Image (cartoon, rainbow, N blue to C red):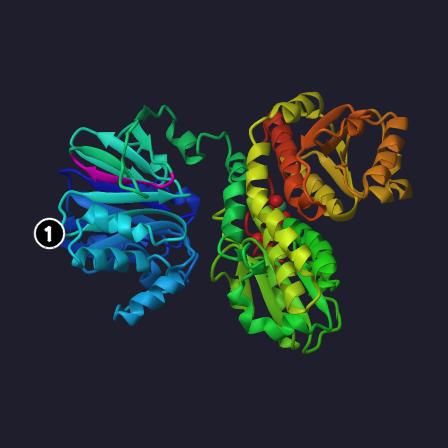
Amino acid sequence: MCGIVGYVGDRPCADILVDGLKRLEYRGYDSAGIAVVNEGVLDKRRAEGKLANLVSLLSDDPVDGPTGIGHTRWATHGRPAERNAHPHRKGSIAVVHNGIIENHLAIKSELSDQGHVFKSETDTEVIAHLVWKHREAGHALAEAVRMSVLRLEGAYSIVVLDADTPNTLVAARLASPLVLGVADGEGFVASDIPAILAHTREMAFIDDGVMAIVTPEGSTLRRIEDDAPVELKTQTVTWSPAMAEKGGHKHFMLKEICEQPDAISNTIRGRISLERSTVELPELDAVADALSDVSHFYIVACGTSWHAGMVGRYLFEELAKVSPHVELASEFRYRRAPIDKKTLVLAVSQSGETADTLAAIKDARGRGATVLSICNVIEASIPRASHATLYTHAGPEISVASTKAFTTQVAALHLLALHMGATRGAIDEATLSADLDALVRVPAILESMIGDDTPYMEFARAWHEATSMLFLGRGNLFPLALEGALKLKEISYIHAEGYAAGEMKHGPIALVEETVPSVFLNPRDDHFGKVRSNLQEVKARGGPVLTVYTEGHEDATRLTDFAIPIPEVPHRVLPLICAIPMQLLAYHMADFKGTDVDQPRNLAKSVTVE
Ligand code: F6R
């Protein structure tokens, strides 16, 4: 996601801010900016694109001073452009923000009615206006920030600067990380440790619902809800700069696996109302007719995104009573599949730049189809070539092997299937409300599954030298078998095949022998008995087996050599849950082998060639 850095002290801070932002570059961004206060004068510089653009702007037109904030933006609301870059300013106030303000439209319209004029398309700008309004009403900066953030719904970490309150920054956090750096005569604040690690190792991690008043003399914390004081507890961070970039994890892939609870929360945030039992996707208003009246429905994607699309098929069939063809974009673009004015083409792409997917939707659009996309990168080529886009808000994915992009695509597909079911009158209220309930519980369930690596390590220790493996599942876990095999082969270079378990006897069972382990996805669901029979067939031929099974269903583990438990969940969210064991298994196998996990050979993150 975006990056934040702030400084108060006695040094001119423009270089400190830019250097801090450079250390967050690995996170990905599309614009950057800083704001500094010098002797009561606030000035800002912002530039679209790489930090080098900001640096060159600063060298042509410098600003400096001993108090400042900086930001790298990864677009979520409003396209990447200078006017949408942070800091956002209103009067003497400048703000940087990470996260998503769900109720920004309501606040914006209320403030517009009071005469406020907004210059950007962002959700962030409302914060600057709110703080300024409370300052104008005579409140001190910290109180003005507190009153403002009490209005915000969603997720945020913010840092606020006020030209009229010298040597002070006010920061606040809800569901988005924020850390303070403590040093003699200086104060630092950042979204991530690497931004300030060069200056101090004494850090304090701010909790949700807490704000910080940062001055060169020291920082104080207050609870946002009631302004009660909160104790500041610092700790010494011993991470190396490289470790700090990965959040203390050995690889970006592991960091991104662990980020999935937050990433999925961001995908569903503001789009589900449990009270009203509705899915709210106003970004799809432009394609409402196409969603309700479809002649042909194609999902086009490549690789892991194609697997997400395959999970989507089960969701659309069950929830919207429509059966999409799930197509590999590289094939679909050369076929002459029937397309007419009532055809809906849904592109699924993390990067939004995959050449085959882009070509497929351009062709379909040219032939009259309505094109909808699910994408992680705002204003990438695929969203620009679509009539409407549902963004996943997963945050930048650095590791080449896709993890959080996949699960957030599946969550977005689930929302879309529910929305389409409601639009088409194909879903009853009880199903809708049960699925919404199941979806909102997913982040906490994933959180509980991440942390205990023991079963993965045991398997990896025993089998990291395998040369071939099979992954098997049925129903909506068949795509997960494909995804498990793809993850394993791309990062560990072990040959792996994913199959629908029922297909075993039609060929792949010939591969089974003592040196070829099979991974069975066999939770307690409608397919349990059938998958168990397939598992028995493998065991009878001497094949080693790892089973992903439902916790407490010990019967499932009787025939298996290795077992990985997952919590019991409603069947439509099983693919989201089963993604974790597939990812962690591949990760630990590759780590044991010592391959380059984050940048596997021969692969690129964004495939912009055919
Ligand atoms: C595998 C992986 C790739 C991508 C594929 C499509 O881990 O990341 O298979 O899923 O190249 O990329 P996007 O989703 O950017 O269109």
Give the crowd class for mark 1: few <14, some 14-19, many >=20 residues within 10 Å.
some
Image coordinates of residue 368 in percent, x first then y, are: 65, 77
Vertical side of 554 occupied by 318: above or below: below
Image coordinates of residue 196 in percent, x first then y, are: 30, 35
Q: Quadrant of residue 521?
A: top right
Q: Is residue 34 visible?
A: yes
Quick check: 217 left or right of 450?
A: left
| Quarter the C terminus occupies | bottom right
Q: Is residue 327 visible?
A: no
* Mark 1 residue type: Gly
Residue 360 or residue 125, whichever sits in front: 125
Vertical side of 461 occupied by 215: above or below: below
Residue 285 or residue 49, whichever sits in front: 285
The residue pinned by badge 1 equals 40
Residue, x 17% and y 58% (percent of image)? 137
Vertical side of 295 occupied by 19: above or below: above
Q: Quadrant of residue 321?
A: bottom right
Q: How many marks?
A: 1
Quick check: 586 left or right of 149?
A: right
Residue 211 on the magenta span = yes
Residue 440 on the magenta span = no
Helix, strand or loop under label 1: loop
Image coordinates of residue 550 in percent, x first then y, are: 72, 33
Image coordinates of residue 359 in percent, x first then y, are: 62, 65
Q: Main secondary structure of the magenta part?
A: strand
Range of the magenta residues?
208-216
Q: Is mark 1 within 8 Å of ligand 1?
A: no
Residue, x 23% and y 35% (percent of image)? 220
